[in-house]
Amino acid sequence: MGSKLGFALDLKTNGTLLTAESADRSAARGPRQVDISLLGATGATFDAIARSRRTLERVLRGVRLLQGRGVRLKLNTLLLDLNLAEREAILDIARQLGVEYGQFVKVSAVGTAVVGRGATSPPVSRWPRSTRPTRHPFSSRYAMTPAAPNPGQKAPQTPLQARRRT
């Protein structure tokens, strides 16, 4: 539907509530890609992060439903203290499923972050430990540099991208 109107449709979901019927509807809309969060390689880790039950099982069911309908998928993982030890196993799951995959490390300033109009989040030190940004030795392997702007756009002031150190 979106491509007929000249739009590229990208969907983002956790995939847990997908059914055969909703997967059919999603596929019929012709998305360019569907991004699904894969937050752990074990049910225990995934459930602890998602604060839900049987989350990994439900996400994998959603992935398979969309794959069966020919939808292009990408799995994404936000690396946290709680799932860092499973990063290789998470990558293995993505490989076994044959889907595109990306791991992300959230880089946050310590302190209070502005969330929206007049609203702020609590300081990172007050976040539940499992959801705090990881303190992985990321900086020893990657250099954080300002992100390159898209052609024709001004360079952003704060976004950073990681470049592997050689």
Image (tube, rainbow, N blue to C red):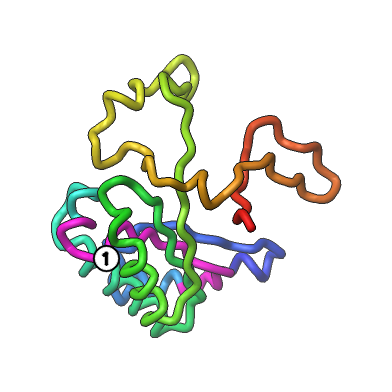
Q: Residue at x 37, y 42 (%)?
A: 134
x, y percent for residue 47: 18, 54
x, y percent for residue 94: 39, 74
Q: Is residue 82 above or below residue 77?
A: above
Category of crowding for the residue at label 1, using alpha-carbon neighbours closer than 10 angstroms: few (below 14), some (14–19), many (at least 20): many
Q: Is residue 156 left or right of residue 161?
A: right
Q: Residue at x 47, y 67 (%)?
A: 101
Q: Is residue 118 left or right of residue 79?
A: right
Label 1 sits on residue: 41
Q: Is residue 157 above or below residue 70?
A: above
Q: Residue at x 29, y 66 (%)?
A: 59
The quadrant of the rendering that contains the N terminus is bottom right
Instruction: In this rendered view, identify the residue nearer to me: 98 or 115.
Output: 98
Q: Residues in magenta? A: 27-46
Instruction: In this rendered view, identify the residue nearer to me: 32 or 114.
Output: 114
Q: Examine the structure image and report whether residue 43 is included in the region drawn in magenta.
A: yes
